[in-house]
Amino acid sequence: MPEVCVPARNWSYMRRQSPSFIQRLFRHRSTSVTSEGVQFLCFTLAIGIAAVNTGNNLFYLLLAMMVSLILTSGIVAEYCLRRLEFHRHLPDHLIVNEPAVAMLVVANRKPRLPSFSLKLFDMSDGRELDRGLEIPQLLPGSSRMVPYSLVATRRGRLQLDGVCVGTDFPFGLFKKQTFYPLEETVIVCPEIKPIDERLVRGLLTTGPEQSADRRGHGNDLYNLRLYQAGDDSRKIHWPTTARTAQLTVRETEAEDQRRAIVYLPTVAPMSHDHLFEQAVSLTASIIQHLAHRGYSLQLLVGASHSSFGQGDLHLWELLRMLALCERRSPQAETIMPGELPRDPWEVNGEMMIVVQSWMGPGDIEPQHPTILINGNIITGAPHAV
């Protein structure tokens, strides 16, 4: 029979392809032995030693049965984990230490075989995050939606690399796991806390809570005048009407022009890193407090700035800026000229709130960030509750 010569390039191609196939087969799989499995293996080893020493056929029969159970356990577990499909639905954003609902959809793409005793884990930075997700049975061709609570512990980008699914079916001797890549990223906004009552009083007395001194929609009294045809009867001021015997209506001060600029410097030494995170959280808390009171807000974070705006979309844009900001070391970088406005305390008549974690080279690390409103330090209210 003539020899068949295979070109060298084909051999090199096969050598390159074979490891990749083996790597694809085993790189996402792991097997561990449970405590019951350790006992079963020890008992199997003891039966094997007894069979060799005695030559008893019953021992060999029992040994063969136990080995077959081990092989069956591995094969069945492997088929339980094959041909699964995952989809994850995450919220648009998260807030530190606030639980949010995420949804994991699991589909079994096997045409005939079901999967049993599935345990699901999120994978992030090579770590398994146990959410307590279990699926007792997943029939062939079916899917299951599994909601779970997702809590982030730090701001920034939360990177989820995939889903690790494991099973100890059928006998609980071994735990086999398989990793399914499913990369997703969600923005985690800073922790938002209730504003300290003393800080609220500081905002009220310093100025940003003041209404515009003109007629318009609001709650504060602007003027009293006689009733005119077409006036809203709900605005009649009955005490004055009863006293003067003339219909009198109340006019309110406009509140729709309240504007504020919130500024967070990002330059701070490494020793103030924890304090900087407090300042970020405090800035987010102040922004939400003012946004819920109808303010038009602008945020300055280091050299970055937003436009003035209102509403939920603008609020989440500002929180996203705070989520992605980073502390800059004063040794590595100097303060950029555009980082501060021309007048840091008032820009075009707007009020400015500054939340500082570092006051300068001579600053001894305080317990809380410093808050300045139009250059005045709010004493006794350095932080949120």
Image (cartoon, rainbow, N blue to C red):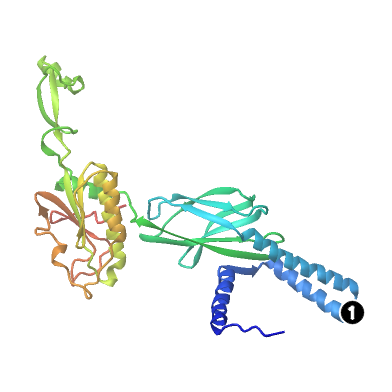
Question: Where, quadrant-wise, is the N terminus in this rendering?
Answer: bottom right
- Examine the rendered structure and indicate whether residue 235 appears above or below residue 128: above
Picture coordinates of residue 318 (x, y %)?
A: 26, 53
Residue 15, x across and y down, in percent: 56, 80
Q: What residue is rendered at 66% in x and 60% in y?
A: 79
Q: Does residue 154 appear anywhere in the picture?
A: no
Relative horizontal placement of residue 202, taking residue 159 as reference (left or right): left
Q: Is residue 246 above or below residue 36?
A: above
Q: Residue at x 48, y 51 (%)?
A: 149
Residue 36 vs residue 123: left or right? right
Q: Nearer the viewer, residue 291 or 71?
A: 71
**Number of callouts in the render?**
1
- Left or right of 339: which side holds 122? right
- Which residue is nearer to you in this view: 253 or 128? 128
Residue with the mark numbered 1:
54
In the picture shown, does residue 70 fall above or below 215? Answer: below
* Residue 162 in picture, x, y percent from top left: 49, 61
| Neighbourhood count class around disc 1 (C-alpha, 10 Å): few under 14, some 14–19, many 20 upward | few
Using the image as rendered, state which of residue 260 and residue 45 is in the foreground: 45
Residue sitting at the far top: 245
Q: Give the amino acid type for the residue marked by disc 1 in the picture.
A: Thr
Q: Secondary structure at mark 1?
A: helix
| Residue 132 left/right relative to 321 | right
Q: Nearer the viewer, residue 269 or 246?
A: 269
Residue 73: image location, x then y, percent: 71, 64
